[in-house]
């Protein structure tokens, strides 16, 4: 296993809820996009709930990375510099 993959696995493990605190650790944009590409959903800590990012696929092919908004509308997601530099991403 590559060192990069080991690091991502450790970061993903750290993002699981803690039994003691019932909190979820945050992570960076790179790991957030890895989670999205593997079929997960992520959001930033300061986004109004329940907005989140997920992968849109059609016929098994990746179509777009989308943001799902509070009113269930969907738009393609273009990350801002703040999003890319943020370390407050959470898996939902």
Image: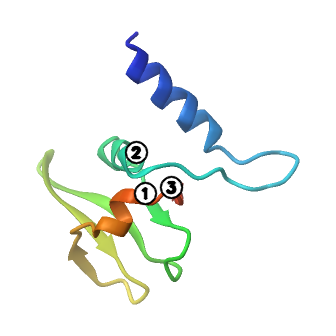
Query: Disc 1 or disc 3, which is closer to the eye?
Result: 3
Q: Between residue 27 and residue 12, name the one nearer to us.
A: 27
**Residue 64: image x %, image y %?**
16, 60
CA gap between label 2 and label 3 equals: 14 Å
Query: Residue at position x 41%, y 43% from top?
Result: 31
Horizontal relation, residue 14 to residue 6: left or right: right
Q: Which mark is residue 7?
A: none
Q: Pointers 2 and 1 in contact (CB under 8 A)?
A: yes
For disc 1, the marked residue is 41
Look at 65% across and 43% down and name the residue there. Answer: 16
First along the sequence among labels 1 and 3: 1
Q: Earlier in the sequence, mark 2 or mark 3?
A: 2
Residue with the mark numbered 3: 87
- Label 3 secondary element: loop
Q: Is residue 74 left or right of residue 1?
A: left
Location of residue 86 by image quarter:
bottom left
Label tally: 3
Q: Secondary structure at mark 1?
A: loop
- Which residue is disc 2 drawn over? 35
Is 77 drawn above or below residue 73 in the view shown? above
Residue shown at the point (39%, 52%) measured from the top left: 29
């Amino acid at each position: 296993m590559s060192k990069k993959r080991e690091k991502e696995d450790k970061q993903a493990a750290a993002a699981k809820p803690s039994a003691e605190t019932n909190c979820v650790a945050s992570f960076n944009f790179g790991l957030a996009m890895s989670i999205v590409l593997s079929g997960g959903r992520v959001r930033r800590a300061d986004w109004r709930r329940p907005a989140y990012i997920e992968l849109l696929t059609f016929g098994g092919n990746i179509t777009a990375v989308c943001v799902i908004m509070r009113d269930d509308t969907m738009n393609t997601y273009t990350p801002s510099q703040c999003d890319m530099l943020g370390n407050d991403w959470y898996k939902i």
